[in-house]
Image (tube, grey):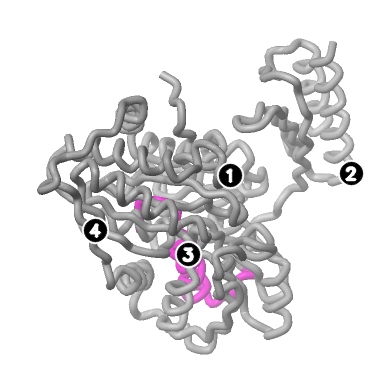
Amino acid sequence: MAKKYFGTDGIRGKVGDLPITADFFLKLGWAVGRVFANEGKGFVLLGKDTRISGYMFESALEAGLSAAGVDTRLLGPMPTPAIAYLTRTLRAKAGIVISASHNPYYDNGIKFFSVEGTKLPDELEHKIEDYLDAPITTVDSANLGKAKRVDDAPGRYIEFCKASIPTGFDFKGLKIVLDCAHGATYHVAPPVFSEIGAKVITIGCEPNGLNINDNIGSTKPNNLIAAVLEHQADLGIAFDGDGDRVVMVDHKGEIVDGDELIYIIAQSRLANHQTLGPVVGTLMSNLGMEQALNRLGVSLLRAQVGDRYVMEMLTQYRGILGGENSGHIICLDRTTTGDGIVAALQVLAQMHQSGKSLHELKSGMQKYPQILVNVKVAKKVNPVEIPAIQQAVAAAEQVLGKDGRVLLRASGTEPLIRVMAEGVDEKTVSALANQLAEDVKNAIIA
């Protein structure tokens, strides 16, 4: 059954527009409280990123949870993966994150974690939505929920991150630039990397509620590239606003994206004779990563775009490593969700163990040019069901051969058909992608 409010990763939108309003979050807090009150006694953890609207939504959720008779433990600004970890280790009934991830400050949203530190199952999301359609009732005053602050949350998470790599590794002499996107990692990422011995230079560590992801962070790494080159650093690391994504920059100022980082982490696991299983990417994962993994003797499985689908496939096929080219990387042998800091540490560990630079480690994977063209449509259609489009795709695939691929998919959030072509020669790929986009447009209009 379709869900009314929940998407593939919680609820997200513009602040002030339904459902991202104070009154909806009050009702949502109550609905969540009712669901977990029915599951038995316990408390709910509540954290947020650094955007200004987090104060409003934190108060609204706390009030709703209290009305339902559920205690709240307030974490303040913390990365999304930290809340997943703390939910599990503090034995909370659930974890709630107020964040819109890599979006600008005027957006916000909410995510939930189960007691195991994983995303909520569909069954619980349906139960929450059922309560959202019911009127709010308040428990007896003696049973109202109480709120307390967890003062040692940052320290707990910092120690967890450091423990994800061997204690004997010494990173003294390594110079790193950290870009925290003025987001939730601003007060935890610098101590993590400095306490393992690296010299840390920071940018994007001065949040003011309005500057989160503002021309900075993993989606806009130009400032990081400039800082790495200026300081002659060994590498740079950029997180997004809630810390579940990471991209890196090598000493030459070249971006190392999620696909390349997954490839490097796979190398690390194999070097330590660890059973890796299949790596899970998405439909957008670069063909070059698939081929590079195959040369290591590792297969790549492709899930739908979205970390939820990557996690489902990892669980189904008993893999431990997966993610997206955006830098959302899941290391299930270290944690339960995508974690930018933990993923970056795994890359540093492989640099230390191999004695190679980040630039050298990524060189084993040759990324293919990948061109994406969006075609606007008036209504939702499945492009692969239209014969004229099928013929156009077959013609493009014949040109690309075995060293290329074509992908058409309807956007899940916008009235768009996304047309992607990938292959060896960038000019050929670009021409094919644009021609295919034109064919799609003509076929849908016809």
Q: Residue furthest front?
A: 141
Disc 1 to disc 4, how far (Cα)?
Answer: 27 Å
Out of 308 and 97, give the one closest to the viewer: 97
The reply to whether callout 2 and callout 4 are in contact (CB within 8 Å) is no
Dot 2: few (<14), some (14–19), or many (≥20) neighbours within 10 Å?
few
- Name the residue that disc number 4 marks: 147
In this rendering, is residue 74 above or below 35? below
Residue for badge 2: 427
Name the kind of residue labelled 4 in the image.
Ala
For badge 1, the amino acid type reads Lys
Mark 1 against mark 2, which lies toward the viewer?
1
Q: Position of residue 284 (x, y in %)?
A: 64, 40
> Which label's residue is closer to the chain start, 2 or 4?
4
How many residues crowd around disc 4 within 10 Å: few (fewer than 14), some, or many (20 or more)?
some
The circle on residue 184 is 3
Q: Secondary structure at mark 3?
A: loop
For marks 3 and 1, the one nearer the N-term is 1
x then y, percent, for residue 70: 20, 47
Task: Calculate the distance from the C-alpha at mark 1 to the C-alpha at mark 2.
Answer: 38 Å
Q: Which residue is mark 1?
A: 14
* Mark earlier in primary sequence (2, 3): 3
Q: Nearer the viewer, mark 2 or mark 4?
A: 4
Label 1 SS? strand
In the image, which is nearer the foreground, mark 3 or mark 1? Answer: 1
Q: Secondary structure at mark 4?
A: strand
Identify the residue shown where x is 24% and y is 43%.
67
- Segment colored magenta: 334-360
- In front: 236, or 281? 236
**In the image, what residue type sits under mark 2?**
Lys
Q: CA distance from mark 2 to mark 4?
A: 59 Å
Q: Disc 2 and disc 3: Cα gap in Å? A: 40 Å
